[in-house]
Image (tube, rainbow, N blue to C red):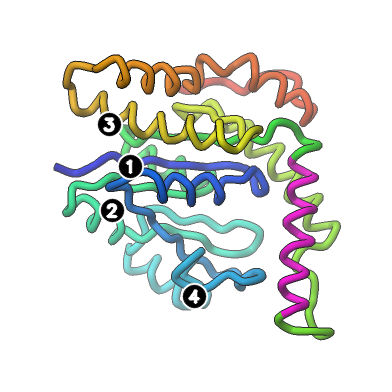
Amino acid sequence: MSGTVFIISAPSGSGKSTLTNELRRIVANLEFSISYTTRPPRGSEQSGREYFFISREQFERMIEEDEFLEWAEVFGNYYGTARRFLREAAARGHDLLLDIDVQGAAQVKRKMPEAIAIFVLPPSRKELETRLRRRSEADDEIQRQLMGDSARPFNTESTIQRRLQTASLEIENFCQYDYILVNDRLEESIDTLKSVVEAERLKRSQTALTSKDKEIVAVADRALRQNMMKQVETILATFEHSRFPTVTE
């Protein structure tokens, strides 16, 4: 039997990569799809670990050959998920985790409405900016260590501001997701994310729930979109959004 597809999306700097890495470490039978991209590696990134870094020509050839489950162009670079990861996970009866942006998530949801979509939010715009600047400094320091005086900064002030502006637009798509996770305290966020995966597996198994199972489901249910609306409203206000976008069921 094929497994469940879990989609995780978030504005850049929300801590999504840390969450997904921890989830993969602590949850069994959960395969991860490494995305393909045409952007250059940052800092210590390696092809086949964070992304498969390929040329624009290679990516467009894969598009022509219909090798992507989803793909999008973001900040002038292509990003995409190869269909083969879905086939391979399904053959083993494992669940598949997709770390993709809102454009890719929308494509997958259209093709696979049963996929479980999780949106990660920062606690506020101010905190997101702090994280973006911290990551920028770390990336640039690694680049200086690797390249010396010839190193060029990855994230200029204009890049950071562009990412903040993009985040403001991306968070409007929260209503298209099944679960909302506010990444404020890392350990709690990891526990919630793990509970969402385990709760969805329990629902799929259709077996009687133990008292421990019910606790897991309760933690996951608190992150359901309809139960997170007040907290999301507070976060949206920090991005100067005055109202919710329309929810599409």
Q: Amino acid at mark 4?
A: Ile
Instruction: Give the CA separation, mark 3 to mark 2.
Output: 17 Å
Q: Amino acid at mark 3?
A: Arg
Say which element carries label 1: strand
Q: Amino acid at mark 2?
A: Leu
Q: Residues within 10 Å of mark 2 (few under 14, many from 20)?
A: many
Left or right of residue 174: residue 125 = right
Residue at point 73%, 56% (across, down): 135
Q: Position of residue 17 (x, y in %)?
A: 55, 51
Residue at point 56%, 18% (across, down): 228
Instruction: Give the CA separation, mark 3 to mark 4.
Output: 35 Å
Of marks 2 and 4, which one's residue comes earlier in the chain?
Answer: 4
Q: Residues within 10 Å of mark 4 (few under 14, many from 20)?
A: some
Looking at the image, residue 185 lies above or below residue 30: above
Say which element carries label 2: helix
Find disc 2 in the rendering and name its residue: 86
Find disc 3 in the rendering and name its residue: 201
Find disc 1 in the rendering and name its residue: 5
Determine if the magenta segment contains residue 237: no
Instruction: Give the CA separation, mark 2 to mark 4.
Output: 20 Å
Question: What range of the chain is rendered magenta?
Answer: 128-145
